[in-house]
Image (cartoon, rainbow, N blue to C red):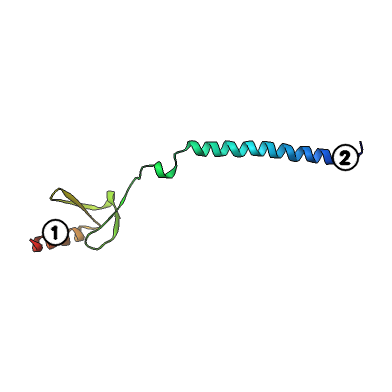
Amino acid sequence: MSPLRLLILAILFYIAYRLLVGGRRHKEVSNDRQKEKPYKEMPADDLLVEDPVCKKLVPRQQAVQHRQAEQTFYFCSEECCQKFISQEGEGK
């Protein structure tokens, strides 16, 4: 065999080896990702709620809460909560 043929064969073997090994690595990484829970199944830590007075979105855990007639209202601030209570008092 000529040295050129040996070189070409060596390059072809190297390419075949990289394709086989590279394919396995890719499968291992994708299998690890499949084992993790997808984003859709993860529970939300905090949901956004809308303030009924100023219509701002506020994280529920940080919002000011007011419970009235078996319903909970969430507010961005104590001022909005007081406005809501005063409006409800005038409406009755």
The quarter of the displayed image where residue 79 is located: bottom left
Q: Amino acid at mark 2?
A: Arg
Tell me, for residue 5, which label it has, or none: 2
Tell me, for residue 85, which label it has, or none: 1
Q: State the residue in front, 42 or 63.
A: 42
Q: Quadrant of the C terminus?
A: bottom left
Query: CA–CA distance between discs 2 and 1?
Result: 89 Å
Residue drawn at x 67%, y 36% is 21
Furthest residue in direction left, as rendered: 92
* Whole-percent x, y for residue 62 in the image: 28, 51
Mark 1: few/some/many CA within 10 Å (<14, 14-19, 20+): some
Furthest residue in direction right, as rendered: 2
Residue drawn at x 72%, y 36% is 17
* Whole-percent x, y for residue 46 in the image: 32, 48
* Whole-percent x, y for residue 12 in the image: 79, 40
Residue drawn at x 54%, y 36% is 31
* Whole-percent x, y for residue 1 in the image: 91, 36
Q: Regarding mark 1 in the picture, which secondary structure is present there?
A: helix
Q: Regarding mark 2 in the picture, which secondary structure is present there?
A: helix
Mark 2: few/some/many CA within 10 Å (<14, 14-19, 20+): few
Select label 2 or label 1 by which is in front. 2
